[in-house]
Amino acid sequence: MQLRLGSAYISCMLAFVLWWSSPSAAAPSVVVSIKPVHSLIAGVMAGVGTPELLLHDAQSPHDLNLVPSDIRKLSRADLVFWIGQALETSMAKIVRAAVSRSKSVELLGVPGMERLQIRKSGLWDPPSDGEDGDRHGEHAAVPREQGRNGDYLQNVDPHIWLSPANASRIVRLAITELSLVDSENAANYRRNGEAVIARILALDLDIGKKLSAVKDTPYIVFHDAYAYFERHYGLNAVGSISVSPERMPGMRRVQLLRGKIESLQARCVFSEPQFEPR
């Protein structure tokens, strides 16, 4: 009798140890297109898994060339987070062909996301014949119902993550989407996500204080990629050297810029490390 009880006890203990030491369910396979969004998703997944990043330092999202291994990652992923065709132009067809709609999270078209129109006046666009370029481009907000239209999104500035409010929206969306595909870790995603949002809020306050003394200072950027940041902090960007990374400025535009830098008293011209300064 004692032997049978002892054997039963040992069997129960072995079963408990095996259950306790067995690995938990595998983390979902998540692919993210660009580094800023990747850092947000990685924060939500902390301690559960690590999302894969498609775009690396030397690449531009505007002309990203996917290799076969990238396409395999996309096709096998449980979730794919990307901005949309307006930013990752070259990968849009591949994503839509390789990833089902239920697994593709196209952030630019998400309802509730703040969206700004691409600026097309003054020093934000090459002057046409007879255009003097005096007007500063305005980054008008896109009505939500229009922003949901895929064609209309081609006129939307895709750099949405530079708005702290949008960054928090992306985090909340990630909590929801990850919890749907991995309900076992829903509490972890929620806890991690709230911590990420708290850090965004703290960073927002810190940046706002640091920029308050220079927010009226006029400056020029290499290309128009910072409208969300400028709008949120009330900065005084007065133009861009290039309309887009794919369109380098010609001699006429360079001459116009030199004159406007002087007339607008731009105090700083920002370059971008991935492009050769001229």
Image: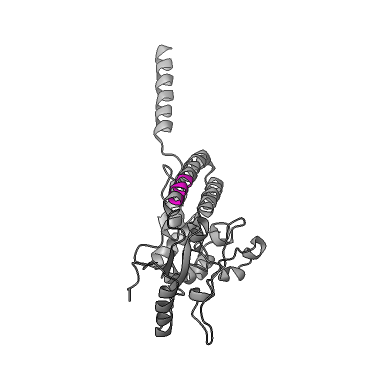
Magenta stretch holds residue 28: no
Residue found at the very far right of the displayed protein: 145
Instruction: Report if residue 248 is visible in the image.
Output: no
Q: Residue furthest top?
A: 2
Does any portion of residue 109 appear in the rendered image? Answer: yes
Q: Which of the pair 190/70 is nearer the observer?
A: 190
Q: Main secondary structure of the magenta part?
A: helix
Image quarter hosting the C terminus: bottom left
**x and y percentages locating residue 90 in the rendered image:** 47, 71
State the image coordinates of residue 244 (x, y, percent, origin top left). Answer: 45, 73
| 161 vs 86: above or below | above
Please tell me which residue lies in front, 97 or 80: 80
Q: Residue at x 41, y 39 (%)?
A: 23
Q: Nearer the viewer, residue 251 or 191?
A: 251
Closer-to-camera residue (189/16): 189
The x and y percentages for residue 82 are 49, 60
| Quarter of the figure with the N terminus | top left
- Magenta highlight range: 201-208
